[in-house]
Image (tube, rainbow, N blue to C red):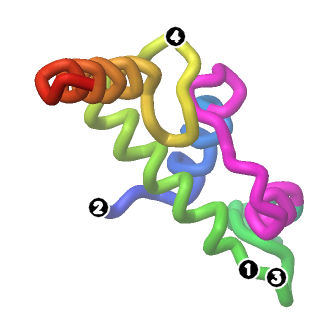
Amino acid sequence: MLIKKRLGVENLSMMIESQQITIPQIPELINELKLYGYKTSSSGNVQYGAPEGYYDDCVTAPALAAWQLRRSNPPVTSRSVGFIQHEEVKRIQQMRFWNEQSRGF
């Protein structure tokens, strides 16, 4: 899957702001999200990423996951847990309930 970094990061930002996904409180991830930005070169090109000497892998990974969520699911307005949509959590909980019922718990 090849996406432009700008589109992936803008999608991630939009999904976080609209509470379609939440970001785990991992210090490295939070730090990279805070440092992540863009700069415009003298020729007018915009480059997205971490400042020199820092990494942006922890931003790129959730951006790719959010992009895949966007592609595989229609937009939702409900909140989600981590990168799992609320509807998926409900389905998993129902499966657990029925499995427990069938085993006599």
The disc at residue 55 is 1
Query: In the rendered structure, which segment of residues is drawn in magenta?
Result: 16-34
Residue 1 image point, x, y percent:
29, 61
- Mark 4–mark 3 Cα distance, whole angstroms, equals 34 Å
Q: Is residue 64 visible?
A: yes
| Proximity of marks 4 and 1: CB atoms separated by less than 8 Å | no
In this view, which residue lies farthest toward the bottom? Answer: 53
Pinpoint residue 10: horizontal percent, then vertical percent. Answer: 62, 41
The quadrant in which the C terminus is found is top left
Mark 2 and mark 1: Cα distance apart in space: 21 Å
**The disc labelled 2 sits on which kind of residue?**
Met
CA neighbours of label 1 inside 10 A, class few (<14), some (14 to 19), many (20+)? some
Q: Which residue is mark 2?
A: 1
First in sequence: mark 4 or mark 1? Answer: 1
Q: Nearer the viewer, mark 4 or mark 1?
A: 4
**Nearest to the observer: residue 67 or residue 87:** 87
| First reached walking from the N terminus: tag 4 or tag 3 | 3
Q: Residues within 10 Å of mark 4 (few under 14, many from 20)?
A: few
The residue drawn where x is 70% and y is 61% is 46
95 over 31 or under it: above or below? above
Instruction: In the rendered structure, find residue 54 and report the number of the disc placed on it.
Output: 3
Q: Amino acid at mark 4?
A: Thr
Q: Are marks 3 and 1 in contact (CB under 8 Å)?
A: yes
Q: Secondary structure at mark 1?
A: loop
Secondary structure at badge 3 equals: loop
Residue 101 vs residue 42, the one in the foreground: 101
Distance Cα–Cα, label 2 vs label 3: 25 Å
The residue that label 4 is drawn on is 77
